[in-house]
């Protein structure tokens, strides 16, 4: 057990098992870069406001820079039996600047430090997630443009419902991921508020220039209440939710890609680079990448739950429970940031099978709704038209004859013009072209929607 940041009023050392149980250094060492950046800015601020001599501030600032250097260069440098990353930094700083190291902590509390570092981590993770999501949206738009005319069935209740195009499907996903990106940008705004200068809970008696500290550390604002600043973890829960929504969408996408790339549908082939073989069955190319994207949704959703339940019973102020925040945040961030490039690679590498899609989109039932709408536009009240077409579908099934033939025969008497253009209604290309109002399947409409989605992630 190396020196602690406290102990003046203690006669015994902490119980060993409790020490190991309570130490956060095994995981909060990930915040070393953030912790040192914040500590350097704080040391400078102490010098600027006259709380310590400027020369001491400079020594602290330089010494902290050296700690970071050594952490990168010296093997085993992180192997110190300390309580947390804050204790690590102060201990290592002491090896460089001696007793002065403690002055860097003047009027400062780990309660504000830990949340400052975590906010910096979350901010950077939001930026990375937003950039990765922009990449995924671009890949969906590229593929979508490639398949803007490729008709395929669209599904409801996992049953083929109406014809759409691959591009239309890709555009739907692109818009979802574009919103996920905005969610990270929103979460970043609320995370990007500086707690430093809050002390343990009540603020600082030093005339620190907090606005300048914030600017130096890239924060947009300073926290307006010290007690709130050390208690608040909603920025962490919000970040985890942004991760969870994105990962959940990845999971849904994966589920669909797994089915539709399999032999039963065969709408497209997955790139080999994202599948693995079977040790027994030589024919297999398993969609492991997609299965993991789907599987990881469990852990990211759990992170939201962890962060909410952790906060649930806590009064205002720092409580050690809050130390549990970090692993949940790291876990959510790692899963999403690891998943997004993989999903992007899968989408970019899809090989479309236009014939398979078209075959599946040619099933006659998929055109029943269009036929009902056409009948209604020919004068029949829509509910009746719906009923009439339902009866035609049923007759086709019973007689085992093509729906379009039945329709042609039975509509001829009362709707001769419509009966004559039944083939057009059952034509997949016509069907998708007919939906040219904004948001519909017409290839031109889809192209416009794809470029609008692209524009949102380029802005
Ligand atoms: N390691 C703690 C955390 O991660 C910060 C230390 C605050 N500890 C304290 N006893 N006030 O939350």
Image (spheres, rainbow, N blue to C red):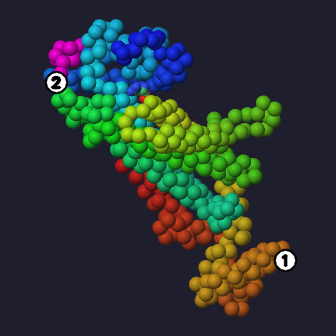
Q: Position of residue 138 (x, y in %)?
A: 48, 47
Residue 262 vertical position relative to residue 201 in the rendered view, above or below = below
Q: State the residue at coordinates (69%, 91%).
A: 414
Q: What is the CA distance from the residue labelled 1 to the residue labelled 2? A: 90 Å
Highlighted range, magenta? 51-59
Which residue is farthest bottom? 413
Q: Secondary structure at mark 2?
A: helix
Q: Residue at x 68, y 51 (%)?
A: 260
Q: Up-down: is 205 above or below 383?
A: above
Residue 54 magenta-drawn? yes
**Residue 109 versus residue 64 in the image, above or below:** below
Say few, some or many: other residues with alpha carbon within 10 Å of mark 2 (under 14 / 14 to 19 / 20 or more). some
Residue 338: x percent and y percent?
Answer: 53, 35
Does residue 217 appear to the left or right of 409 in the view shown?
left
Q: Is residue 188 visible?
A: yes
The residue labelled by disc 1 is 399
Looking at the image, in which quadrant does ligand 1 appear? Answer: top left
Neighbourhood count class around disc 1 (C-alpha, 10 Å): few under 14, some 14–19, many 20 upward: few
* Most foreground residue, 275 or 185: 185
Q: Which residue is mark 2?
A: 48
Q: Is residue 438 above or below residue 273?
A: below
Q: Earlier in the sequence, mark 1 or mark 2?
A: 2
* Residue at the image position 26 percent from the left and 17 percent from the top: 103
Residue in the picture at 16% in, 24% down: 48
Query: x and y percent of residue 365 in the render?
Result: 71, 70
């Amino acid at each position: 057990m190396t020196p602690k940041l406290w102990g003046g009023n203690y006669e015994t050392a902490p119980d060993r098992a409790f020490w190991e149980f309570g130490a956060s250094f095994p995981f909060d060492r990930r915040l070393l870069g953030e912790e040192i950046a914040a500590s350097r800015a704080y040391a400078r601020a102490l010098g600027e406001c006259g709380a310590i001599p400027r020369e001491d501030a400079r020594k602290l600032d330089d010494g902290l820079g050296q700690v970071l250097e050594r952490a990168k260069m010296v093997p085993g440098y992180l192997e110190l039996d300390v309580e947390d990353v804050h204790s690590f930094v102060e201990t290592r700083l002491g090896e460089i600047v001696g007793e002065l190291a403690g002055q860097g902590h003047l009027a400062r509390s780990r309660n504000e430090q830990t949340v400052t570092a975590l906010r910096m981590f979350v901010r950077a993770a939001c930026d990375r997630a937003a950039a990765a999501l922009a990449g995924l949206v671009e890949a969906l738009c590229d593929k979508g443009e490639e398949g803007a005319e490729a008709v395929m069935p669209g599904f409801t209740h996992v049953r083929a419902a109406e014809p759409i195009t691959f591009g239309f499907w890709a555009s739907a996903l692109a818009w979802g991921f574009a919103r996920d990106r905005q969610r990270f940008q929103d979460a970043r705004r609320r995370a990007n508020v500086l707690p430093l200068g809050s002390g343990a809970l009540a603020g600082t008696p030093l005339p620190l220039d907090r606005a300048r500290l914030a600017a130096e550390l890239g924060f947009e604002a300073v926290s307006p209440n010290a007690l709130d600043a050390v208690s608040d973890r909603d920025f962490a829960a919000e970040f985890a939710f942004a991760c969870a929504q994105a990962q959940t969408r990845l999971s849904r996408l994966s589920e669909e890609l797994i089915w539709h790339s399999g032999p039963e549908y065969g709408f497209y082939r997955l790139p080999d680079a994202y599948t693995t073989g079977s040790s027994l069955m030589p024919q297999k190319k398993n969609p492991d990448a997609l299965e993991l994207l789907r599987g990881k949704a469990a852990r990211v959703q759990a992170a939201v739950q962890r962060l909410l339940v952790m906060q649930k019973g806590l009064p205002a102020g720092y409580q050690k429970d809050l130390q549990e925040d970090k692993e949940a945040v790291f876990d959510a961030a790692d899963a999403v940031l690891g998943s997004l490039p993989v999903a992007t690679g899968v989408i970019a590498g899809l090989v479309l099978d236009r014939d398979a899609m078209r075959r599946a989109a040619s099933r006659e039932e998929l055109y029943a709704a269009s036929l009902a709408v056409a009948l209604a536009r020919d004068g029949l009240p829509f509910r009746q038209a719906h009923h009439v077409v339902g009866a035609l579908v049923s007759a086709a099934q019973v007689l085992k004859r093509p729906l379009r033939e039945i329709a042609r025969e039975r509509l001829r008497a009362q709707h001769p013009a419509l009966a004559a253009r039944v083939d057009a209604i059952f034509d997949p290309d016509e069907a998708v072209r007919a939906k040219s109002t904004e948001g519909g399947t017409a290839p031109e409409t889809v192209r416009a929607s794809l470029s609008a989605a692209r524009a949102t992630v380029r802005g």
